Amino acid sequence: GAGGWIRFEPRCLVASSDETTWREFRKWSNRQIIITRVYAPHLWLWGLLSHLLFCGTLLLGLFVVLASGPAPMRLLAGAFEAGILLLGFSKARLRTRAARDLFPEEASLLRQHGACYWRLWPLVPWVMLFNFVTAGLTRRIEWRGRRYQLVSPTEVRVLGPDASAGRADNAK
């Protein structure tokens, strides 16, 4: 609009320690990537391609390791697969360190739950791939009990209340 720039500022990040269900997390994570697709489609495309490549490489490596064939080929594939897994683990450890650096006031919470960054890392690329594929198929999000259609970076259409929010309101 006014020709200004939006810059990332780490001090504007907010830690969230709320309890959530898998369904709520999935809706939240999908919403973040759908918003990215609408407002920064080039970033969404790079994210989709990188997660397709990573997950595809893991599957291909597993297939080669398990497939019958010369033992040296399977051993080499296993070494590459182990290297990829080690890099993923290292990246997850860096996320733990980044969280500690960005949120020093949350040190006790991170000591208690911070290991989830590296313990659950094998699931992250698959969840992200699901998010990126979902974002490629829809521009609809649900937020705070309402449904929206993200038409373009400058237009949002309100579709109505979330069906599950209506059920929850009726149950009260």
Image: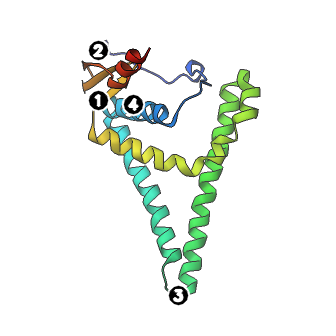
The local secondary structure at tag 4 comes to helix
Amino acid type at mark 3: Pro
Residue 110 in picture, x, y percent from top left: 71, 31
Q: Are marks 1 and 3 in contact (CB under 8 Å)?
A: no
- Of labels 4 and 1, earlier in sequence is 4
Looking at the rendered image, the disc whose residue lies closer to the viewer, 4 or 2, is 4
Between the residue at mark 2 and the residue at mark 1, the CA separation in whole angstroms equals: 24 Å
Please give the residue where the numbered disc 2 appears in the rendered image.
Answer: 1
Mark 3 nearby-residue class (10 Å; few <14, some 14–19, many ≥20): few
- Of labels 2 and 1, earlier in sequence is 2
The local secondary structure at tag 2 comes to loop
Please give the residue where the numbered disc 4 appears in the rendered image.
Answer: 31
Please give the residue where the numbered disc 1 appears in the rendered image.
Answer: 140
Which residue lies at the image location 48% right of the left edge and 79% below the top edge?
67
- Of labels 3 and 2, earlier in sequence is 2
Rendered-image quadrant of the C terminus: top left
Q: Are marks 3 and 2 in contact (CB under 8 Å)?
A: no
Residue 55 in picture, x, y percent from top left: 46, 57
Amino acid type at mark 2: Gly
Which residue is at the far front? 171
Answer left or right for 107 relative to 63. Answer: right
Between the residue at mark 4 and the residue at mark 1, the CA separation in whole angstroms equals: 8 Å
Amino acid type at mark 4: Arg
Which residue is at the far top? 2
- Of labels 4 and 2, earlier in sequence is 2
Amino acid type at mark 1: Arg
Please give the residue where the numbered disc 3 appears in the rendered image.
Answer: 70
